Image (cartoon, helix red, strand yellow):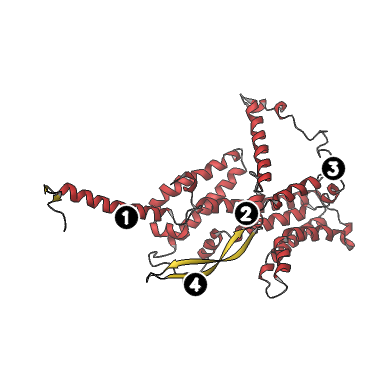
Amino acid sequence: MTGRCATSRLLDRDFSLLNSIIYFHKAIQELERVHAKLSFAAFLYAIIGATGTFLLALGLSTAENWKPLFHRYIRMGPAGYAAAISIIAFIGMPHIGELASLDRETLAVSSSFRPTSPNRSAFYVSFWKLPIDRYGIQKPRGYAWDIVLLGTTTAMCGMLGIPPANGLLPQAPPHSESLMHTVKEEVTTVGDDGVPQTRVREVRRVYEQRWSAFLHAGGILLFVSPPFMHVLGLTLKSVLAGLFLFMGEQSLSVNPILYRFLYILTPPLELPLLPGSIRSYWGIHAYTVLQIAITISIFIVTLTKAAPAFPVIIVALVPIRLIVMRKLWNRETLRHVDQWACKEGTPEDEEDEKAKGEVPEAAEKAMVSGGQEVGGGIYEGDVV
C-alpha cells in the first residue's frame, strides 16, 4: 500500500467541512465590517443583498433538475454560472430606484494600473529585502524561496490546465464539478453461469482541457487593468458575503457528515435500515460527533497564532484513523462510514484480504511442522 492510498475519506470530509465553516465565517466577517462602517439602513440592505445573492445562486445551480423546462443546453448555462449570474444581478440592483441613495461598502480598487496600496509604486516585490528579522529567522532567504516555489507551482498549474496549487476556491465543488458531465458506457461482466453480460451505465467524467484555467488567468489580468478595474470596484462587500455563503453551502451539501448529523436528530424509527452486521446507530453517531468536534477544533486553531500548524493536525488524522479508531469502533461500523480516499474499498477490506491470505499459509506451515517425513515427500499427518 503506497502512501498515496493510505488516507481515508475521514480527512477529505473533515477538510471539506472545515472549508464550509471558513466560508460561513468569512461571510459573517464581511457583514460585521459593513455594520461597523455603514448606516443601519445600509446594513439591513447588505443582509438582504447577501441573502439574495446566496438564494439566487442556489436556485440557479439546480437548473439541471428543471427538466422538462427548457432545452438541456439552456439549463446548463445557469447551472454552470449560477454564482456569476447572481453576483452580477445583485451588484446592479443597488443602482436602481431609491436604493441608489443608500451608502454602500465596495471593493477598494485603483484607478490606474498600479498596486492598490498607496505605499507601493511597482507590482514587483523585492522579497529578499522584506523586514523579517523580527520573526527570529536565522536564514531569511529561505523565506524568499518559499514565495518563489509557490509562484512557480501556480504558474505550472496554469499552463497544465489544473487547479492552482494553493487556495480554498479551487477546492470548492462549483469549481471542481464545473467540467464534469455524465456519459453512458458499456460494462461487460461474467455471471454465475459463466455467460458474459453487457449492460449500460451512467458515469461521471471530466472534460480534460486547458481553456478554463487559461480563461481564468486571462480574466484576472483583464480586471486588474482599467477600465475593467472600475467595474470590479462596483462589487459590494455584501455580495461577497452571499458568495461565501453559497460556496460554503455547496461544499456542505455534498458532505456525508451533514446527513449523518441529521440522523442524530431523527427519531430512531424513522432512520434507514442498517446492514445486518451493525446493530444500532450509536457507533455511527459517535463517529459523526467526533468528526465534527475535530473539525471545529481545527477551525479554532486557525484563529490563533498556531494557525500555520493546522495542516499537521489534519495529517495526524491518518494514523488516528488507521490505528486508534480501530480499537474504538467495530470493523463493520468503520466500513459503513469510511472508505479509502483514492481507491475502492476500505481499510477493513484490506485487513480481511490479508487475513484470508495468512490463514492458508499458517495451516500449511502447521501441517508441515506437525508431520514426519516417511519417504517420497509424504508426511504423516497430511490429509489425503
Instruction: Give the spatial CA distance, label 4 vs label 1.
Output: 38 Å
Q: Along the horizontal axis of the image, is 29 left or right of 285?
A: right
Three-letter amino acid code at the position of disc 1: Lys
Q: Secondary structure at mark 4?
A: helix
Query: Disc 2 marks which residue?
Result: 20
Instruction: Give the spatial CA distance, label 1 vs label 3.
Output: 67 Å
Which residue is located at x 43 percent, y 61 percent?
A: 282
Query: Disc 4 marks which residue?
Result: 270
**Residue 176 image offset from top left, x and y in percent:** 63, 55
N-term mark: 2 or 1: 2
Number of other residues with Cα within 10 Å of mark 1, as a class: few under 14, some 14 to 19, many 20 or more: few
Q: Quadrant of the C terminus?
A: bottom left
Q: Secondary structure at mark 3?
A: loop
Instruction: Give the spatial CA distance, label 2 vs label 4.
Output: 28 Å
Query: Disc 1 marks which residue?
Result: 356
Query: Disc 3 marks which residue?
Result: 110
N-term mark: 1 or 3: 3
